[in-house]
Image (cartoon, helix red, strand yellow):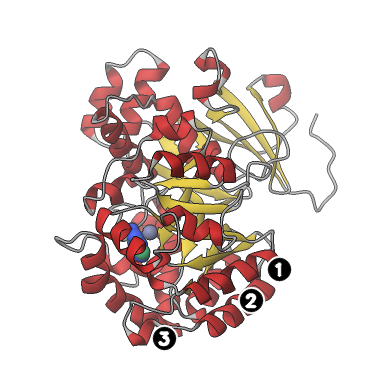
Amino acid sequence: MEQQLPASTNIVAIRASFLHFIEDPAKVEQVDRAYQFILDGLMIVNEGKVQSLTLFTEEEAELYSNIEDKRGKLIIPGFIDTHVHYPQTQMIAAYGDQLLEWLENYTFLTEKQFSNKEYAQKIAKFFINELLKNGTTSALVFGTVHSESIDALFEEAQKIDMRLIAGKVMMDRNAPDYLLDTAQSSYDESKALIEKWHNKGRLQYAITPRFAPTSSPLQLQAAGKLKSEYPDVYVHTHLSENKNEIEWVKSLFPEREGYFDVYAHHGLTGHKSIFAHCLHLTDKEWLAFSSSNSVISFCPTSNLFLGSGLFDLDKAEKNNIRVGLGTDVGAGTSFSQFTSLNEAYKIMQLQGQKLSVFKGLYLATLGSAKSLSLDDQVGNFEVGKEADFVVLNWAATDLQKLRQQSSTTLEDKLFALMMLADDRNIAETYITGKLVYSANKYSGKKSDF
Ligand code: GUN
Ligand code: ZN
């Protein structure tokens, strides 16, 4: 018998294999307590939220008139990118420099273009499509110094009800004049954007001082004031990425104990403060960071591309610090969180550490959700969570097929997927149970570019 439902009810029933995480694999005695894998499962999404995820049975299936049959595919929660610069989309893969020279030579010039709302709209559209194409359903995003950049991005995200966090860059020194605001104007403009966008649907705001070198103490004070006025809003910035940067911060803020203390002193640390990189923290800083309950975004492809250093994930774990995974495009070289995990694995190898596929996929989903304090809403398929998910092909190339054929365990199959997959493995992306990207439809579609 079919379920009797009110006419307005919006139910999606999907049959496939499912994998999602319940716990951090590093924190359970047996790894299989950390995840749930269902080879033949049925997920019911009702009004955009997970209603149930069970083993497929004929009896239950009879309750639903339309079941989308995706057997042979793997469904996991949508990836969450905890650090990415949408204005740098067009300058990805810029040759040869480390952080400070890279900012001077490429980044600032590219970001200049965002004073033009039309350009911002064009890149925002491209950027969001690129996220979806890579199975990323949520992100914490840098704009530029221009408020228009954030309006353009949020307007685009709003169209598909995407869960996105973003903020206008605050930057009042050590950058070209055309990219500078002031302590006062950055406070006023950020405040106006918070009032306009924060908690509007699934959108949230992040106070975004670029990094300590480009903010005067007065501007950091203004950022701290905003945070105290809107404690629910995020803080998003960079910390301890590059050795020359760290020396520069010491010379700019001689009165502070070190880089982390610059932010702590101005009230910018805490459980909703996300710091990209954290590659060269001192032991004292690791402790202070941990005590503040702040969060690290680990950005593997960026750290390698800019030659910045190797992130010590084991140390972060030992210090009980929440860590999310970030692409950091345009210093990062891919929007794919599979590619991030591929490089994360190698970064850990170089330090004698191990990244299991379970820890890796946890980091890209529930771990990142926890790092953004969004795990009540997204990150896995617990009942009541928002149904943001991605439908994966186990193999998208001949080589992937060959490798998967010889694989006999779930762990090995997933590991091969983690190391070899990219956007070609993303069959579909769903946001709140609605299809927002399909590789099939996309293959026939002409790009605007
Ligand atoms: N530090 C300050 N600005 C940036 C940026 O745009 N990218 C990266 N990777 N680090 C930064
Ligand atoms: Zn960055």
Instruction: Identify the residue at image location x=26%, y=61%.
Output: 99
Q: Secondary structure at mark 1?
A: helix
Left or right, 289 with respect to 199, comes to left
Q: Residues within 10 Å of mark 1 (few under 14, many from 20)?
A: few
- Closer to the chain start, of discs 3 and 1, is 3
Compared to 330, does 18 lie above or below? above
Q: Amino acid at mark 3?
A: Asn
Q: Residues within 10 Å of mark 2 (few under 14, many from 20)?
A: many
Q: Amino acid at mark 1?
A: Glu
Q: Amino acid at mark 2?
A: Lys
Out of 131 and 271, give the one closest to the viewer: 271
> Looking at mark 1, is its residue's CB closer than 8 Å to ligand 1?
no
Instruction: Identify the residue at image location x=63%, y=41%.
Output: 375
Instruction: Identify the residue at image location x=34%, y=24%.
Output: 354
Is mark 2 in CB contact (under 8 Å) with mark 1?
yes
Out of 393 and 351, give the one closest to the viewer: 351
Q: Quadrant of the N terminus?
A: top right
Q: Quadrant of the C terminus?
A: bottom left
Q: Which residue is mark 3?
A: 116
Which numbered tag is attached to residue 229? 1
Query: From this viewpoint, which residue is outermost toward the front?
Result: 255
Residue 17 in sight here: no
Q: Secondary structure at mark 2?
A: helix
Residue 124 percent coordinates (x, y): 44, 70
Q: Which residue is mark 2?
A: 191
Out of 350 and 386, give the one closest to the viewer: 350
Of tags 3 and 1, which is closer to the observer?
1
Left or right, 387 with respect to 302, comes to right
Is mark 3 in CB contact (under 8 Å) with mark 1?
no
Residue 150 percent coordinates (x, y): 52, 73
- Closer to the chain start, of discs 2 and 3, is 3
Instruction: Identify the residue at image location x=38%, y=24%.
Output: 356
